[in-house]
Image (tube, rainbow, N blue to C red):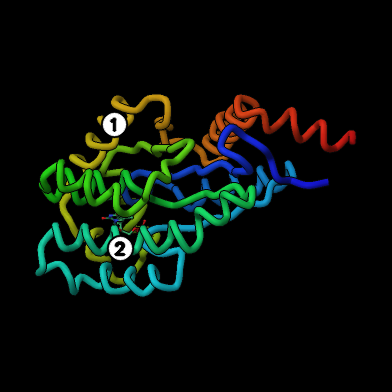
Amino acid sequence: MTLHRKTARGVQGLFITFEGGEGAGKSTQIARLAEHLRADGDDVLATREPGGSPGAEALRHVILSGSVEPFGPAMEALLFAAARNDHVEQVMRPALRSGRMVLCDRYIDSSRVYQGVTGDLDPDLMRAIERAAINGLMPDLTIILDLPAEVGLQRANARRGAGAADRFEKETIEMHARRRDAYLAIAAEEPERCKIIAADRPAGEIAREIAVLVDQLKVDRGMKARRAAEVFK
Ligand code: TMP
């Protein structure tokens, strides 16, 4: 039995991204969904941005240390894009091509929101950078974990404890609120791809809601039916 699936795009897994502000619970929900999918026989890759490949992890360290902040948001956006392109070409596209389910903690929408909206960058520049970074690799589904900025920040602070805040966590509550609005605006523009999930609820409840969404997507893409057919072969 093979877990590979034929879709209109060839043998391809689902590409699911998780987005939201600090403390929204992305990593918890990625772990829960990975567990759910594995129980259903899927081969899952859980990964993150910035990072996910050796080259991109090196850039992550540089970006989050704050040492490129003086270069300005446009140069920062280019570095995020360079990291993304390495991650896409070295890790995610090959994984999807071999039929794996890829769950990614942050992707293009983080750049659109953090650099594009709160970095006040030119939308045309952002679109061009995005195109170069992903070369057509759009998510099949983007889960936006939505949370009031104050709640997210409290959670992130509690989790960090005495540890140092990274370059982005240090910013103001107003900035976080603008980012929340920007995520909601993206979801309104791309309702097919982006699903908003209220994140100020028990983790188990959120995980079940996400599992239902993903199971439905698998049915829509003919993956569930094909799996059953393979099992009975
Ligand atoms: P993390 O805290 O979720 O690991 O993400 C690291 C920080 O990097 C987070 O504050 C958001 C920020 N970020 C961007 O500004 N642009 C991006 O494209 C990505 C992927 C992350």
User: x, y percentage for residue 87?
Assistant: 43, 61
Residue depicted at 33% across the width and 30% down the height: 187
Q: Amino acid at mark 2?
A: Ala
Few, some or many C-alpha atoms within 10 Å of disc 2 (few <14, some 14-19, many ≥20)? many
Which numbered dot is residue 184?
1
Residue depicted at 14% across the width and 57% down the height: 74
The secondary structure type at the circle numbered 1 is: helix
Q: Determine which quarter of the picture holds residue 122.
A: top left
User: x, y percentage for residue 54?
Assistant: 44, 73
Q: Is residue 208 left or right of residue 177?
A: right
Give the residue at mark 2.
82
> Given contact means CB atoms under 8 Å apart, are the residues at marks 2 and 1 in contact?
no
User: x, y percentage for residue 220?
Assistant: 60, 25
The secondary structure type at the circle numbered 2 is: helix
User: x, y percentage for residue 92?
Assistant: 50, 55
Q: Pick whichever, 97 or 32, lies toward us.
A: 97
Residue depicted at 38% across the width and 50% down the height: 106
Q: Pick whichever of labels 2 and 1 is earlier in the sequence.
A: 2
Residue depicted at 23% across the width and 51% down the height: 129
Q: Quadrant of ligand 1?
A: bottom left
Q: CA distance from mark 2 to mark 1?
A: 26 Å
